[in-house]
Amino acid sequence: MSDKREGYISWDEYFMGIAILSGMRSKDPNTQVGACIVSQDNKILSVGYNGFPIGCSDDDFPWTRVGEPLDNKYFYTTHSELNAILNYRGGSLEGSKLYVTLFPCNECAKAIIQSGIREVIYDSDMYKDMPSSIASRRMLTAAGVKFHQYKHTEREVSMKL
């Protein structure tokens, strides 16, 4: 008979929680996205959030979503998924899972596929009808990368000591 505590969080809750927490590091005033890459044996391999590359000051580049291409954020920001992939220093990501707060765009899908990530668990799918998301789904499916939406438990996250 076990006396272990009941009601502890699942692996999915834990890793999506890490992705959400990582997204809170983003300085983007509109969209904060976080990602967490996990090994097959449930070890965190890397995390990332959307922001500018190392050496590119948050104060020197635009955060706006509108305007001329060189005057908005889109040419400059690195998405959370790519940041997590590039932040990993341990070798291969083959067979790993990616937890991400927003369904990956087509550019991130390419990096996910090339890095060997085999499963994507995403939270929001707010751009599902956009061409970049449609292309992403096509590529992930063609490459055999499984993907599904995270199922919320509505559990409140708090620490009781």
Image: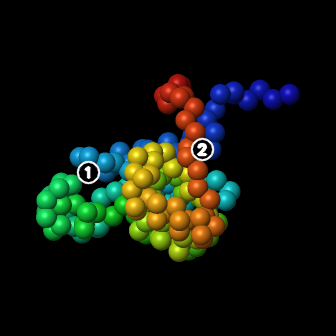
Quadrant assignment, res 12: top right
Q: Amino acid at mark 1?
A: Asp
Query: Depth check: 73 or 131 in front?
Result: 131
Question: Which of the labelled discs sits on residue 28, or is there none?
Answer: 1
Percent across and percent down for residue 92 are 58, 73
Percent across and percent down for residue 98 are 54, 57
Residue 111 appears left or right of 13: left
At 22% from the left and 60% from the top, the residue drawn is 73
Residue 38 is at least partly visible in this image: no
Under circle 1, the secondary element is loop
Percent across and percent down for residue 62 are 16, 59
Which residue is tagged 2?
12
Query: Depth check: 111 or 156 in front?
Result: 111
Q: Residues within 10 Å of mark 2 (few under 14, many from 20)?
A: some
Q: Earlier in the sequence, mark 1 or mark 2?
A: 2
Quadrant assignment, res 83: bottom left
At 30% from the left and 58% from the top, the residue drawn is 51
Q: Amino acid at mark 2?
A: Asp
Residue 98 appears left or right of 11: left
